[in-house]
Image (cartoon, grey):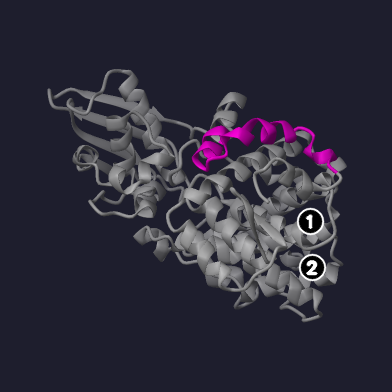
Amino acid sequence: MTANPAERLIDHALALRWEHIHPEAREQAITFLHDTLAVGAAGVGAAHADAILAMVQGWGAGDTAGILGRPGQRLPAASAAFVNAFQIHGQEFDCVHESAVLHPMATLLAALLAEAGRGAPVTGERFLTAIVAGVDVAVTLGLAAPGPLKFFRPATAGIFGCVVGISSLRGLPREVALDAFGHALALMSGTMQAHLEGKPALPVQVAAAARNALVAVDLAVAGMPGVRDPLVGPFGYFPLAEVREELDAAIALLGHGHRITEVSWKPFPTGRAGHGGIVAMQRLMARGLTAAALERFDYHAPPLIQRLVGRSARAGMEPGYARLCLAYLVAGVLVRGGIGLADFSRAALDDPAVLAVAAKVRVLDDGNSDAAAFVPARAVAHLVDGATMIETVEAQFGSPAWPLAPDEHAAKAKSCLAFAGLEQIADGLALAMPGFARAPDALAAIRQTGVMG
């Protein structure tokens, strides 16, 4: 390691200027701002979202920052960051960086919205630059850890991305930003046990990371020094949270573009590891597959897929569990014709027709040596007449290799807003995005769309 990696990442972020960011990265920052605002608004309908809001209201009143999808609701900044992050990730519809195994925008946008609400106005350019900076850093930490997941990276790496994003947004002095980055280690948490059990603690961990990023910054601004080797020190991030570290190589990539260009949309409100199976089932149905004809469905995929979504479907499962259950997802597609935000209600989850098909689904480890691979995968439908149908998945729908077309992106945003009862603002939100960088007050521009108060 040629220099303290925390310093290298902070210096990268503080040096970023909108005019020097490549046009592709600028475009993707705007695109995923739009996507995440809509997804966060839809999060008002996520399981436990109302309970989270009620809990946070008990922490104290305030009107500093707004809540996505709840135009009349305002809270203290840290409370708003918590609720917005929960809502953004609460339905597994937020964007993802596949190679880093990380959802970068759920924590980051929630923290930036809260920070923008409690200080001097910032321009659209400044806000978008902070997004690029935060995604760069969070994803770099994910890419630097090529081993299997030990902790939940959207929360653990995410808090560092949030701190960097806020540092960029406010133009913090280098020493203050470094202190805040050090405090992020003390405030970091996020267990994969919640993923294993499919518990709603997953979005709670994302929420805590967004809130704690504000705490880390506030401690530094107040003059409290933070640890100076938070990433590779003996008890730093990588020794504690990851299997191994290749940080130099990951940081070197920052000299060759921005990580926001590598982020994938989520076309379906499910764990990303389930998307390949959904697409394969859609293709099989287009070729004539029906539920009555299916004897067994085998999805041969990299070990990460089996680990993340290879669980069995069961009556009474929670929405968070079902979103991470390939058996439920592909069965829902085959029986109901698709999978969307409405397919995780209690009645939908306990649908006997879907559960009967789900019992025929297996996710099989194909032995791929890449611990972070999502593809290639192969779906094999064994039919009751003894025939087989096969579909191969070479790319993830929504990835840079197979991105959403503009009309597909717009349709997703509109469906999210409709789910929140805000379909009437869809066109206005979309129209605000192309000129967002020129906005003199980024937060005011977002509020004017009606997506938050």
In the depicted view, which residue is nearer to us: 177 or 43? 43
Question: Which circle marks residue 336 in the picture?
Answer: none
Per the image, is 350 magenta? no
Query: What residue is shown at x 18% (from left), y 40% (from top)?
Result: 356
Q: Is residue 11 shown left or right of residue 51?
A: right
Q: Which residues are magenta?
A: 413-439
Per the image, is 433 magenta? yes
Query: What residue is shown at x 63% (from left), y 45% (from top)?
Result: 37
Q: Are marks 2 and 1 in contact (CB under 8 Å)?
A: yes
Quickly name the residue at label 1. Answer: 13
Q: Is residue 317 shown left or right of residue 424?
A: left
- Can residue 328 be seen by looking at this rendering? yes
Q: Is residue 431 above or below residue 443?
A: above
SS assignment at label 1: helix
Query: What residue is shown at x 80% (from left), y 78% (from top)?
Result: 222
In the depicted view, which residue is nearer to us: 345 or 361? 345
Quickly name the residue at label 2. Answer: 177
Q: Main secondary structure of the magenta part?
A: helix
Going by the numbered disc 2, the residue's amino acid type is Ala
Q: Which of the two discs, 2 and 1, labels the residue nearer the N terminus?
A: 1
Query: What residue is shown at x 31% (from left), y 31% (from top)?
Result: 336
Residue 190 image point, x, y percent? 51, 66
Q: Residues within 10 Å of mark 1 (few under 14, many from 20)?
A: many
Q: Quadrant of residue 293?
A: top left
Q: Is residue 430 above or below residue 447?
A: above
Q: Residues within 10 Å of mark 2 (few under 14, many from 20)?
A: many
Q: CA distance from mark 2 to mark 1?
A: 10 Å
Going by the numbered disc 1, the residue's amino acid type is Ala
